[in-house]
Image: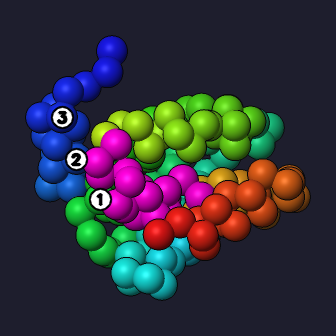
Amino acid sequence: MPMNRQEQLECILDHFERPRFRERLHEAPIVMQGHNPSCGDRVSVFVVLDDANQRLARMTWEGEGCTISQAAASLLAELVQGKRVDEVLAMDSRDFAAWFGEDVVSARLRCVMLPLYTLRLALRTSLNKETEADETDWAQFRQER
């Protein structure tokens, strides 16, 4: 069920003030750092896959930056725990961005998408799944204002 604007703001603030899965996971074999040079946001993702490399057994993150990017990293980590790798790679960017509301997304899309794009790149790089979608993600990221 879609959230109204007030619920979206409460969700963003809740994830920023009480981030989920925010910690360096020292045993993580998959680590990727993402950076938004236009505003300075930084997100690092730490991923442990199951023994078959099919599911995210655990995903954590660390970062610094604006409320939106940090809330997005927290929300993403909450959403992907236990998900299949192919599900994460196929996540619709627009659906993820919709959690934040059109007015936030239109002005801060790079902030919202930084954690998702970083996680996708980490998975694709680690599992040797470079795809056209990866280039599309980052090309879109570079073009968004």
Question: Regarding mark 1 in the picture, which secondary structure is present there?
Answer: helix
Over which residues does the magenta segment extend?
102-117
* Residue at image location 86% in from the left, 54% down from the top: 131
The one of 36 and 30 positioned closer to us in this rendering? 36
- Magenta span: chief secondary structure: helix
Question: Regarding mark 2 in the picture, which secondary structure is present there?
Answer: helix
Instruction: Report the disc number at residue 68.
Output: 1
- Contact check, label 3 and label 1, Cβ < 8 Å: no
Which is in the foreground here, disc 3 or disc 2?
A: 3
* Residue at image location 30% in from the left, 74% down from the top: 65
* Residue at image location 23% in from the left, 63% down from the top: 67
As displayed, is residue 60 above or below residue 64?
above
Whether residue 93 is visible to the viewer of this picture, yes or no, is yes
State which tag comes first along the sequence, 3 or 1. 3
User: CA gap, disc 3 to disc 1?
Assistant: 15 Å
> Is 80 left or right of 15, judged from the image as shown?
right
The residue tagged 3 is: 5
